[in-house]
Amino acid sequence: MKNLRTELTTTPTGHFINHQDHIVTTGSCFAASFGHRFTQHKFRCVPGLFGTLYNPLSIHKLLAMTAAGTTPSADSYLQAQDIHLNFDFHSEMAGYSRGELELRIRMLLETARQELSEATWLTITYGTAWGWQRKDNQQWVANCHKRPAGEFTRQLLPVAQLAADFTSCLTHLRRINPRLQILLTVSPVRHTRETLQGNSVSKAVLRLLCHELYADHSNVHYFPAFEIMVDDLRDYRFYAEDLLHPSPLAEDYLWEKLQAQFMNEHTRSVLARWTEVQKALSHKPFMPQRASHREFLQKTRQALASLAGELPVEDELRAIDQRILELH
């Protein structure tokens, strides 16, 4: 039988991620989703730094602002009824007063600067190449915060502008962390509000941007999450009910592909052992007082203890010891 599927194969980069690394993810909701995958698998990771951001200019702006130690301009703040917001941040960053919001932003930027200065990997996920520019001051915004559309100009951001902006951002990042490796992805989430045609053009711009950045910078790498969804999986059954986001099964597949490209054999082996332990820890026995269940817990504890030198499993060891103690 002919092969009925085109599988996308990835080549190990030689720049591997392991459990000694410090990872920061930022960008679209896919960045947060993958960041949580890292934390679930015991990597030291800060998922979704800054909250959800979609266009490259807004992502670069907050990264550069953090690295340079600056704060948002005064005219980036706005008030919507009794809530204060900022055009450079997602609506989750809000306050009941201007002062409260400024404090929250300052604390976030200080924490982000510390994380970025210590990170070994920064994962950036671009969601869209469509940008919204304020008409009053020509500033690009991360979020319109439901302001009237007439206050903004919607434009497709050109690759040359985005590439130059990234290079400027990278200069700031290198000043606080010269060893930082950057992993780029294009979000596989479909932005149908931009229309299917607009989404296709947007993703094409982002993909070309990543191609140029990977070619121009030795510490920049690329993971083909977008290509895996649209060319390898290529079926609506791999999307969630909204038909926009990858399904849990698709995310599992993407995670396996990421491991194959960016993790060495030892790290993948540790992850496989941890996955089995996770399944055992989530097991709910039908009759917990049976001797077989006590043996199961002891074997699970042994497997968990064997990972103690590789992963931070102290909390899990204490929890399973408590379960064993309760049975006695």
Image (spheres, grey):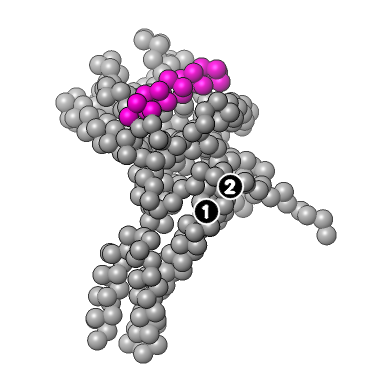
Quarter of the image that includes the N terminus: bottom right
Q: Does 208 lie within the magenta span?
A: no
Q: Do the residues labelled 1 and 2 touch (CB within 8 Å)?
A: yes
> Considering only order in the chain, which callout, 2 or 1, is on the residue closer to the N terminus?
2
**Which residue in the structure is indicated by mark 1?**
264
Q: Is residue 202 visible?
A: no
Please tell me in which quadrant of the rendered image residue 14 appears. Answer: top right
Give the overall secondary structure of the magenta segment: helix
Out of 239 and 182, give the one closest to the viewer: 182
Kindly give the residue lying farthest to the right in the view shown: 1
Mark 2: few, some, or many residues within 10 Å (few <14, many ≥20)?
Answer: some
Q: How far apart are marks 1 and 2 (CA)?
A: 8 Å
Out of 269 and 54, give the one closest to the viewer: 269
| Relative image position of residue 64 (x, y in whole percent) | 36, 24
Q: In this view, does 3 lie above or below 52?
A: below
Q: Is residue 21 visible?
A: yes
**Which residue in the structure is indicated by mark 2?**
12
| Relative image position of residue 186 (x, y in whole percent) | 54, 36
Point 76% across, 53% down: residue: 4
Point 55% across, 37% down: residue: 222
Q: Is mark 1 on a helix, strand or loop?
A: loop
Point 72% across, 48% down: residue: 6
Left-right relation of 149 to 212: left
Left-right relation of 141 to 3: left
The boundaries of the magenta stretch are 154-176
